[in-house]
Structure formats: C-alpha cells, structure tokens
Amino acid sequence: MGSKMGFEAKCYFCAAGIGGTPDWTELTNVKDVSLSVEASEADVTTRASGGHKVVVGGLKEATIEFEMVWDTEDAGFAAIQAAFNGRTAIGLAVMDGDIATAGSQGLWADCAILKFDRQEKLGEAITASVTAKPTYSADAPEWKTIAAA
C-alpha cells in the first residue's frame, strides 16, 4: 500500500545547512507538521487562447509550519530557537518517512525561522508554533527522494 500515516513522517534539522553531505538530526519534539508548496501563476493568455485566460506555473513558494513542546533541554528545540533569535539559516528536511530509507521523499531547504510563537494553554503543555521558509543560501531548495543504497 502506498499511503502513509502522519506519524510515519519525520522532520530533520542540520544547523550547517543542506549543502554537501548534511548531518541530519531528527526533530522528535514536533507535533503536527504542515508543508505547503505552491507555484505562482504567470499569465500567458494570447488571442489564440479562444477567449480563455491561460497560465503557466511560475516561482514556487514553500512554507513549513509545526508545533514543538516548549523544552529548552531538547537539542532540536534549542536549534530552532537559536536560528530564530539569531536570524540565521537552518537546514530543514520535511520527509514522508525516515531520511535513511530508500523512497522517502520531501523538501530539503535552508530556512529562515520566521515565527516562533509561544502558546500557554491552561490545561496543556507550553508549545512553540513555528513557521519556516526557504531563505537566501548557496544551496537551492530541492525536492529530494532518497535513492536505494
């Protein structure tokens, strides 16, 4: 069966970024994760379009959103918080499975952490709500599928 459950997916970080051979560390402290990748539209309508507006896909934009339990002793939490506070890039990989398993796929990108909100709900653990987007880097974002060894 080709479908996967959300709990099978994994997120990783690499403080040094995605270039070369990244040394990935799993972000085990994440809860719900959302990866949105969409392309802008470029209008290519001509008189030959038969009265229809036609478009082609333009630049892609990716947004990664997730929640983490507020745990300052967790290495992943500390790395994400440091990237936000220091305004530094951090490599992120949002995969549909283990990064070492052939066939796993997802987005790899050096990202800016743009939101690091703290949620303090009365009856729940304190959490951080995080938003990341690809940032200026020598290494372009890429959709990566892990090849068989």
Image (cartoon, rainbow, N blue to C red):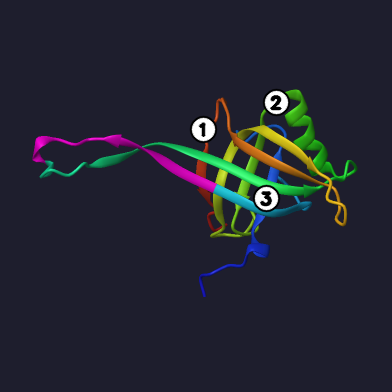
Q: Which residues are magenta?
A: 36-48
Q: Residue 11, labelled with which disc?
A: 3
Q: Amino acid at mark 2?
A: Thr
Answer few, some or many: residues within 10 Å of disc 1's Cα (few below 14, many 20 plus, some between 14 and 19): few
Where residue 18 sits in the image (x, y, percent)? 62, 36
Q: What residue lies at 80% left-to-right and 42% top-to-bottom?
A: 77
Query: Which SS type dominates the magenta stretch?
Result: strand
| Left or right side of 99 for 129 | right
> Residue 119 location in percent, x, y?
79, 45
Q: Is residue 57 magenta?
A: no
State which tag comes first along the sequence, 2 or 1: 2
Question: Mark 2 or 1, which is nearer the eye?
Answer: 2
As drawn, 102 above or below 143: below
- Between the residue at mark 2 and the residue at mark 1, the CA separation in whole angstroms equals 16 Å
Chain-order first, disc 3 or disc 1 = 3
* Badge 2: residue crowd in 10 Å (few <14, some 14–19, many ≥20): some
The residue tagged 2 is 88
- Residue at the spot x=72%, y=34% of the render? 15
Is 15 located above or below residue 68 in the figure?
above
Pointer 3: residues within 10 angstroms few (<14), some, or many (20+)? many
Residue tagged 1:
140
Front position in the image: 149 or 4:
4
- Disc 3 marks a residue whose amino acid type is Cys
Q: Are marks 3 and 2 in contact (CB under 8 Å)?
A: no
Image quadrant containing the C terminus: bottom right
In the rendered structure, which amino acid carries the disc numbered 1? Ala
Q: Residue at x 41, y 41 (%)?
A: 39
Indicate the position of residue 13 as horizontal and vertical percent values.
70, 42
